[in-house]
Image (cartoon, helix red, strand yellow):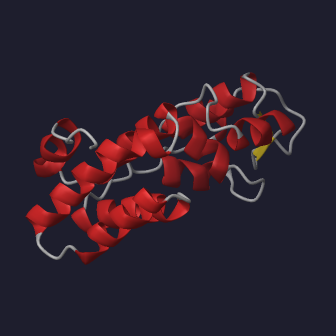
Amino acid sequence: MHPRKTELAHTVLQAHRAPLDLRQRRALILCDGKRSLAELSVLLGTDAPTLITQLQRSGYLDTDDASTAPLVATVATPAPPVERRRSMVAARIYVLDILALQRNPTAAQLHRVLQATREEEDTINALQLALAHLPALTSEGYAQRVRGRLQEVLPEAHLAAVLDNAPLPV
């Protein structure tokens, strides 16, 4: 079984204010009609069959077989849980990419500041500053999704420092 996006899914993914959480968006992006449910389980975790089933019932996914049976029964053995890697480098690169996508002089300046950081404390300060300015550069929902992704990739020791102590933009 190879789940693939419906027209509704394509439309929802293009509208960044869709009613999907980050995990559902990631699942939709990965469901390209080429990956099997087993492969998706490795990428998304052991609850992928349930997540895919929910997206299918909501009209976001089609499958290549005619069966409408729940997808949960399709995977015989659950995939091993995916260990999420947390890294300051991954968080830094992610925010650099987000800032590079913004067509704004403030975002360009924030990008240069973050790119120039070498010390961990400077990186934390630059990430805080970028997060504080992001809602003014994009929509509030987009900024929240960025915060959610950072919550997944930042080392746990730095979560509170970066996400809770972001300074207010000036």
Residue closer to the observer: 4 or 112 = 112
**How far from the left and from the top, in percent, is residue 156?**
16, 48
Residue 45 in sight: no
Residue 61, quarter of picture = top right
| Residue that appears at 31% across and 74% down | 115
Residue 62, quarter of picture = top right
Please indicate whether residue 55 sits to the left or right of residue 4 in the image. Answer: left
- Seen in the picture, residue 156 relative to 111 is either above or below; the reply is above
**How far from the left and from the top, in percent, is residue 11?**
78, 38
Residue located farthest toward the front when viewing the structure as drawn: 170
State which quarter of the image contains the C terminus: top left
**How far from the left and from the top, in percent, is residue 167?**
19, 41
Residue 114, quarter of picture = bottom left
| Residue that appears at 61% across and 25% down | 19
Residue closer to the observer: 52 or 30 = 30
Residue closer to the observer: 130 or 147 = 130
| Residue that appears at 31% across and 59% down | 91
- Seen in the picture, residue 103 relative to 159 is either above or below; the reply is below
| Residue that appears at 69% across and 53% down | 36
Disc count in the image?
Answer: 0
Residue 120 in sight: yes
Please indicate whether residue 10 sits to the left or right of residue 136 in the image. Answer: right
**How far from the left and from the top, in percent, is residue 140?**
47, 32
Please indicate whether residue 42 sits to the left or right of residue 9 in the image. Answer: left
Residue closer to the observer: 147 or 127 = 127
